[in-house]
Image (cartoon, rainbow, N blue to C red):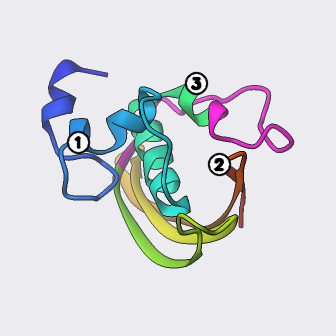
Amino acid sequence: MSEDCAENLCPCGSSKSYVLCCKFLHDGLLKAPTAEALMRSRYSAYVFKLRDYLLKTWHEDFRPKFLKFEKDLEWLSLEVTDRERGLEFDDEGYVEFKAFFKKAKKKSFMQERSYFKKIDAKWLYIRGD
């Protein structure tokens, strides 16, 4: 990750700078307060290829053994389309989103409804449909 990315807007779409948004979560200084905050930070982690953060925020029962990043994939933007529960005092929640990307010079998007659980006061990614 380049040093100037810290001064740019966070890729999660929050309209905040990266250093005032997902960087605190990526560096382990804060825990995500909501399922949506975790989902946004995970999207940013994919943008910056932060493998350790992604694996750490994945529930161990569902976590892959290896996580490979596609070389020719460029994440462009994130749009949260729905959320259900997943607030600070909930213990589970769903976040639906579209993640736009470019691969082999062709733009496309993926859509997912992600399921999160809070375990020991920490939000974890379980799975996406």
Q: Is residue 15 left or right of residue 32?
A: left
Q: Which residues are magenta?
A: 55-75
> Label 1: few (<14), some or many (≥20) within 10 Å?
few
Q: Residue 3: where, in percent of width, then height?
A: 19, 20
How far, Cα to Cα, is label 1 from label 2? 22 Å
> Label 2: few (<14), some or many (≥20) within 10 Å?
few
Residue at 46% of width from left, 67% of height from top?
Answer: 98
Q: Residue 99: where, in percent of width, then height?
A: 44, 60
Residue at 65% of width from left, 48% of height from top?
Answer: 121
Residue that lies at the very extreme toward the right in this rendered image: 61
Residue with the mark numbered 3 = 52
| Residue 66 is one of the magenta-drawn residues | yes
Q: Residue 74: where, in percent of width, then height?
A: 38, 42
For the residue pair 27 and 73, the one nearer the viewer reads as 27
| Residue 100 is one of the magenta-drawn residues | no
The quarter of the image holding the C terminus is bottom right
Question: Mark 2: which amino acid?
Answer: Ala
Q: Of callouts 2 and 3, which one flags the residue occurring earlier in the amino acid sequence?
A: 3
How far, Cα to Cα, is label 2 from label 3? 20 Å
Residue at 20% of width from left, 31% of height from top?
Answer: 6
Q: Of callouts 3 and 1, which one flags the residue occurring earlier in the amino acid sequence?
A: 1
Q: Secondary structure at mark 3?
A: helix
Question: Mark 1: which amino acid?
Answer: Leu
Q: Is residue 124 left or right of residue 31?
A: right
Q: Which mark is in front, 1 or 2?
A: 2
Q: Against 25, is 118 above or below?
A: below
What is the number of the mark on residue 20?
1
Q: Residue 83: where, in percent of width, then height?
A: 53, 77
Residue with the mark numbered 2 = 121
Mark 2 and mark 3 residues within 8 Å of each other at the beta carbon? no
